[in-house]
Image (cartoon, rainbow, N blue to C red):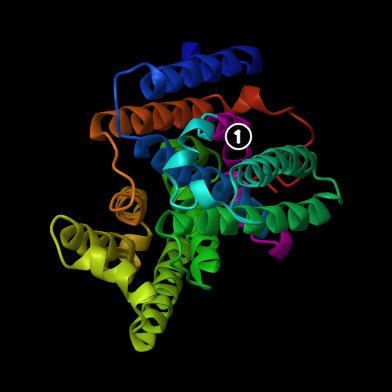
């Protein structure tokens, strides 16, 4: 397995090959449906930005559990640059948005493209600065964490409003932005749980008591965010329901009255809320690394279904292309995690697990 660990130069070469592969899939004449790339971007932007945001929040509040995973989680920050490059591939597909032919001051192709690309690049730059500072244990890591979180909230809000909500123009929801960045944090905790599962025995051999405690802390966070997510979901649904306005209720009707959309809706509700809540309410489950990782995978699957439900009725997509893109992204994420020792400078890391 050591041979799979990549130094930065080789890692960026892998990203280049992946980018060319995705471009070939989208524009090589293999698929005609345009939605797969957007779906992949929405999903993985949430995951990667959320992962760094989780560390930033932990630094600001002085959470101890992050000491087990700081380097592993922060090593994913180069993928933010890759996601910005992937977003650039969306330019030819912006014509599929319903506002493209009669754009206004805010919704027009050049401004849409530039503001979102700028925020993706800014999230990469701030994540990079924060990651280096956090690993070195510098005092400025706290203001940098706050800056990153501000960029994160803004970027995820635009993902919600620009990338997803404007597909159903003129439908709108004022809660959609908050819903997306809270869900991205939830996804970050889920990825942290999977990362801890991957490295659990190595870390437990160094400090079994602390590692077990950090696992329980992560399980509690997953449990808490399942409840928070459910509250936000219900609040948004309630606003749409009691307003009973055609431009608002139509979004729900299209996604809950026909198959397979109705099945997908129940599926993501069960995966993101019901199963994590019912499983992690048990003290024993919180202490099992396998159980916590299984819950985390279920949550991520539910989020994938949810975002698919948001996009698919408005923008058709090729399922084969979607599966290939997300499998490649998952493989690169695992490779990034495995190569964490090479992708960030060693520094002092004065906030290491052993302290």
Residue 74 covered by magenta stretch: yes
Q: Is residue 23 visible?
A: yes
- Residue 256: % across, % down: 21, 67
Q: Residue furthest bottom?
A: 242
Q: Name the residue rendered at 73%, 47% in the picture.
A: 351
The crowd level at tag 1 (other Cα within 10 Å; few <14, some 14-19, many 20+) is many
The residue that label 1 is drawn on is 84
Side of 206 relative to 93 (left or right): right
Is residue 14 found left or right of 37 in the rendered image? right
For the N terminus, the quadrant is top left
Residue 329 coordinates in the image, percent (x, y): 43, 30
Q: Which of the two residues, 179 or 98, is positioned nearer the viewer here?
A: 98
The percent position of residue 165, horizontal first and vertical second, equals 46, 59
Residue at figure coordinates x 47%, y 69% from the top left: 172
Q: Which residues are magenta?
A: 60-88
Residue that appears at 37% across and 29% down: 325
């Amino acid at each position: 397995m050591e041979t799979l660990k990549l130094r930065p130069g080789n890692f960026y070469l892998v990203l280049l090959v992946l980018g060319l592969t995705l471009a070939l899939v989208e524009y090589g004449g293999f698929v005609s449906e345009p939605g797969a790339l957007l779906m992949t971007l929405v999903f993985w932007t949430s995951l990667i930005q959320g992962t760094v945001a989780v560390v930033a929040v932990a630094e600001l509040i002085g959470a101890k559990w992050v000491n087990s995973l700081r380097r592993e989680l922060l090593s994913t920050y180069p993928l933010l640059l890759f996601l910005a490059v992937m977003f650039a591939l969306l330019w030819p597909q912006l014509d599929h948005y319903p506002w493209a032919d009669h754009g206004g001051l805010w919704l027009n192709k050049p401004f849409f493209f530039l503001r979102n690309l700028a925020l993706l690049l800014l999230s990469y730059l701030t994540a990079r600065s924060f990651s280096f500072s956090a690993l070195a244990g510098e005092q400025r890591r706290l203001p940098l964490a706050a800056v990153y979180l501000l960029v994160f909230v803004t970027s995820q809000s635009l993902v919600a409003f620009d990338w997803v909500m404007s597909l159903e123009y003129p439908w709108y929801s004022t809660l959609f932005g908050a819903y997306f960045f809270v869900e991205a944090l939830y996804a970050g905790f889920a990825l942290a749980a999977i990362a801890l599962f991957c490295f659990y025995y190595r870390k437990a051999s160094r400090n079994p008591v602390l590692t077990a405690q950090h696992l329980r802390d992560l399980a509690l966070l997953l449990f808490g965010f399942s409840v928070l997510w459910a509250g936000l979901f219900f609040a948004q649904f309630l606003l749409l329901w009691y307003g009973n306005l055609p431009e608002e209720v139509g979004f729900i009707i299209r996604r809950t009255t026909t198959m397979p959309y109705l099945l997908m809706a129940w599926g993501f509700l069960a995966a993101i809320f019901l199963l994590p809540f019912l499983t992690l309410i048990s003290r024993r489950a919180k202490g099992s690394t396998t159980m916590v990782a299984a819950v985390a995978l279920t949550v991520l699957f539910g989020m994938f279904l949810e975002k698919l439900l948001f996009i698919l009725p408005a923008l058709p997509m090729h399922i084969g292309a979607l599966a290939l893109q997300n499998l490649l992204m998952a493989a690169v994420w695992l490779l990034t995690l495995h190569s964490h020792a090479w992708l960030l400078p060693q520094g002092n890391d004065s906030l290491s697990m052993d302290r």
